[in-house]
Amino acid sequence: MWGIGPKIKHASALIAASFLIGAMAVPAAYEKPSDDSPITLKTHCPPSFQLTEDNSCQFVNMYMMYQSLKNVGTGGLRKGIPAARDGFTPQEIDLGRYLFFDPALSKDGSMSCATCHDPDMGFADGRARSVGVTGEEVTRSAPTLWNSSFLTKYFWDGRAATFEEQMLGPLYADNEMGNTREHLIETLSAIPEYKRLFKEVYDSDGISLDQIYSSLAAFESSLISLNSRYDQYAHGYQDALSKKEIAGLNVFRSFVARCAECHTPPLFTNQQVAVIGTPEPAGMPRDIGAQALDGDKTLRGGFKVPTLRNIVKTAPYMHSGRFETLREAIEFYNKGRGHAVGKDEELVIHWHIHEPDLTNEELDLVVTFLGTLTDENFKPETPKRVPSGLPLAPASANDL
């Protein structure tokens, strides 16, 4: 159906039919895990992927049957989906999973990628702005990683084009994970279990930065969330949504609310940068966003349109966590174009932002509909232990 042909030899991942009808030194905290059994990497693909004869994981989903990638507007629900990044081996994906949860990737062994991208919090961290190794808040919130495999822009300002380019930011920023390239290699190379696992995956005697980046990208590419009740409805199962949820979908897709023109199904983002004029938290200056990339004044205060997938799990909202609830975020749009922009500021507000003047009932219906985008069926397993022997450091450790 999708041109896969006889290459597929393992189909257990067929998406449940997709339809479901301090000091820079090697951390002294490394110790041999209490469980002496060696870590075994998985030989099967994550859900949403099928194993090919050449031991690579290929993305498969019902949205691949639909050809249209045009703006949804008020059109049909069955939309095509961009190409996913796939082709990694199961072992490389699983090695990336261990790296993702291992605090050994940070400067002092105090935090992992999962600290700011916790699977139990929609791969965000429940904070308005994340906290790094210095204990201080950074300037922006942690975006979800769900469905990042389809994206062409990363970070709130869209400054990275690939997983590998994106991960250089948090890994080496002083106020995030605080590491250096040299220290990262030194740390992982001193851990026997990582040396064995990297040898298994890459058939090399040492550990390289490219291998680290590739395995993390492999894991992040496997985080697929396309099996929500909305998806079941879009694929033809009419009873997947209640009458209120369908009414909320209709408001969301209407030419009055115009939500779907930027939050375009099925990813619920058009991947564009938009200036919407969100107010900054009290006491914080205007974050110029995408303007910082090349000085384009029309992009002052511009940020990437975020996905709405699993949105109820990732409060607070906006690039700075300005709004605590979904209702607050939707009300912001309803209050009219540029209403929160100061008199002394000049922002070129995106043309889709206008004054929909939705009723309270319609606002509530949109909130109700957004709840149908939750899908954590294929949430990856958190390792019971990681090769470094360090304790796991999820976002819940951040005094939430």
Image (spheres, rainbow, N blue to C red):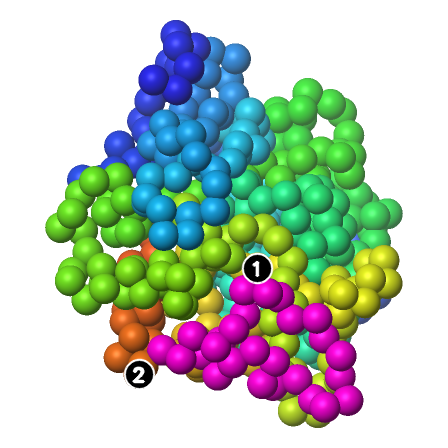
Disc 1 to disc 2, C-alpha distance: 24 Å
Residue pictured at 65% horizontal, 91% vertical: 282
Q: Is residue 319 left or right of residue 134?
A: left
Q: Which residue: 72% across, 75% down? A: 347
Q: Main secondary structure of the magenta part?
A: loop
Q: Amino acid at mark 1?
A: Val
Q: Relative to 321, say whether 267 is above or below.
A: above
**236, 392: nearer the viewer:** 236
Q: Amino acid at mark 2?
A: Asn
Q: Nearer the viewer, residue 170 or 111?
A: 170
How far from the left and from the top, in percent, is residue 49?
42, 30
Residue 5 seen from this side: yes
Residue 360 is tagged as 2
Q: Please tell me in which quadrant of the rendered image residue 308 appears.
A: bottom left
Magenta highlight range: 332-358
Residue 197 in which image quadrant:
top right
Disc 1 element: loop
Report crowding for label 2: few under 14, some 14 to 19, many 20 or more residues within 10 A (C-alpha): few
Look at the image and tell me in which quarter the N terminus lies.
top left
- Disc with the residue nearer the chain's start (1 vs 2): 1
In the depicted view, which residue is nearer to us: 53 or 232?
A: 232
Q: Which residue is mark 1?
A: 305
SS for dot 2: helix
